[in-house]
Amino acid sequence: MQNTNKASAISKFLGTYGILVMLLALVLVMTLINGISFLSLSNIQGILTQGSIYGIMALGVTFIIISGGIDLSAGSMVALAAVVSSSFGQLATASNRIFPFLPQLGIWAPLLVALIFGGLLGALNGAMVAKLKLFPWIATLGTFYIARGLAQVITAGKPVTQLIPSYSKIGGKIGILPVPALIFFICVAISWVLLNYTKFGCDTFAIGGNIGAARVTGININKTLITIYAFAGVMYGVAAFVFAGRVLSVNPGAAQNYEMSAISASIIGGTSPMGGKGTIWGVIVGTLILGTIRQGLTLMAVDAYWQQIAEGAIIVIAVIFAMMREKPRN
Amino acid sequence: MGKTKNLKELMANNGTYVILIAMCVLITIVRPAFISVDNIMSVLNAATVYGCMALGMTYVIISGGIDLAAGAEVAFAGVLGASFGQTATAAAGKVFPGLPELPFIVPVFITLAAGFLIGAFNGFLISTFNTPPFIVTLGMTTVLRGATLLITGGQPVSNLTNGYVVLGQNLFGVVPSVVLVFLVLIVVDSVLLRRTVFGKSVYAIGTNERAAAVSGVKVPSRKIIIYAFSGLMCSVAGLIVAARANAIHPGAAVGYELIAIASCIIGGASPSGGTGSIRTTVVGALIISVLRNGLTLLKIESSWQTIAVGLVIVFACALDVRRNSSN
């Protein structure tokens, strides 16, 4: 009796903090392999900077997955939003301006464009899911191609370069904190409040838990779904803005497969692939786990192809574990 | 009055055929060169690779699943097989430098076996752990692309043996041999789907998985076979890609899974499973091929073609939803 109590207490503890234990174990293993330098400030900064882009995306993706959907277009959306927004942040003297008629604008312009344009793109996904009643994976697979194609068309296949100097500050640091990480934490705070303390967050869980029941209780399903995808789009916009600040030369073919990292981070963090369950702090841990694995493999000088294989394997394994967690509930 | 009703019925039953014919007529009016034998063969030729993929995908979609790894399966199976089909003189770019020149049957067998086994593994992951097919196969895409790059070190596999050359370049009259392969597969897959117990069980699983299980269909093992079959069809596509260019790049067939899926759905297979047929999938594949050929003849650049395919899939799915809700 006491034993089963103990066992259930342990499994409860692992259920709640399991991924945190996993993160710590992973950091320990990577430190043992790569030496104590793995815990150095610059390395931790590296993990945070790297992780923040798909971490920000994962926040938006998490809302979508909780609502029972999926977004395969996230990477293409980031590329398109990055290309379009950074076109508003080119130097007046740049030789390859996408919009030659624009004067040189402040950093606010690309940021605003990224947020609004990202939100619109997301709303488009949401409208297809809500109004056209398309399966989310089909609708977003369609926009995956459309957005990528548009990014190519707008830039004529060439990268957007010669950005205004303030852009490089986005990829820089304030004190010891990388700016991308700071932006990630701001997005985390916003997402956390939205998911846990608003009617919108409540409705998101309700739709993912049981869409029929949600409809009966009077939730405006269409409006909520469109808002969910639009919010995710805004997050992609932020990610696109940060991305442009980091690379300073935005290629229309950029951010390929980023949707995979975002989905991985979310599901590793405990978001149920079947919808209805997920937490923001889980996304943070999921993002850090993914970042630790990546940084560790890079330091171990693992071949880039093997890293790619590992990343695909991680998402498959994460989904398998997620479905095994799911079983007791059904 | 009666006429409009007839027209409606015609569209409802044969809509995809009408669209295909209308497109051909329209393009011919604008660009008469479309209707030449050469161009028609090139339309068919262009359809073979994703057409083969779409044949396997039809089984998967009817069963209520999806195989987003299809494009990566084409590249993996094609590249692995081609590595065993390089000429002895291809010393510099040989994947396995120690290998003598092998008879064509060896690379063919390895290609097909690789596709079948990878597909079976997908099916195993999906049926054993009850995981959503699109996430698992998306993850497998990354794994397979990485593995393909690993095999070749990022380089294309070229200088393939005579068997590849014959398959890729021989004509039977005016018909390229790869088109002939495609036609044979259409017939085989169609019979398999319509006339066998296996085919019936594919529909049963897609219509109502629980009911199928209760009525004695071994759902998990059937699912493994369905995905393995899709992998097998993709490996044929891989063989064709390699044969046509006498080389295959590890980045081959990127995004082709979307075109294969679009072919099925334009043809009328429902993404929710239970409906679809080989015949309509082939029409769907031809519609896309004609569309792309037409866009090329009209000198529209390839980025717009990517966008067009994306739009077509979304519209086809939206139409499918309308169809289902009106029934």
Image (tube, coloured by chain):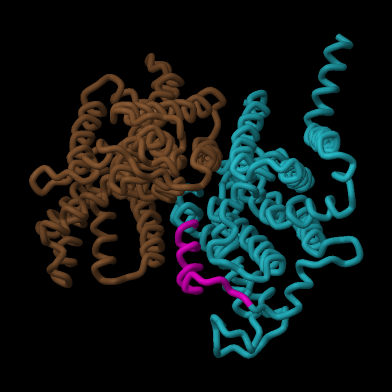
Chain colours: A cyan, B brown
For residue A278, above or below residue B190? below
Where residue A178 appears, as percent x and y from the top left, is 83, 62
Q: Residue at x 66, y 84 (%)?
A: A91
Image quadrant in which the N terminus of chain B is located: bottom left
Where residue A230 appears, as percent x and y from the top left, is 60, 61
Where residue B159 appears, as percent x and y from the top left, is 35, 43
Relative depth, front residue between B145 and B93: B93
Q: Residue at x 43, y 19 (%)?
A: B221
Q: Is residue B143 magenta?
A: no
Relative horizontal placement of residue B188, taking residue B79 as reference (left or right): left
Residue extent of the magenta highlight: A144-161
Q: Residue at x 17, y 59 (%)?
A: B39
Relative horizontal placement of residue A31, taking residue B123 as reference (left or right): right
Q: Is residue A151 magenta?
A: yes
Where residue B169 appears, as percent x and y from the top left, is 21, 46
The picture quadrant where one finds residue B164 is top left
Residue found at the far left of this picture: B173
Image quadrant in which the C terminus of chain B is located: top left
Relative horizontal placement of residue B275, taking residue A204 as reference (left or right): left
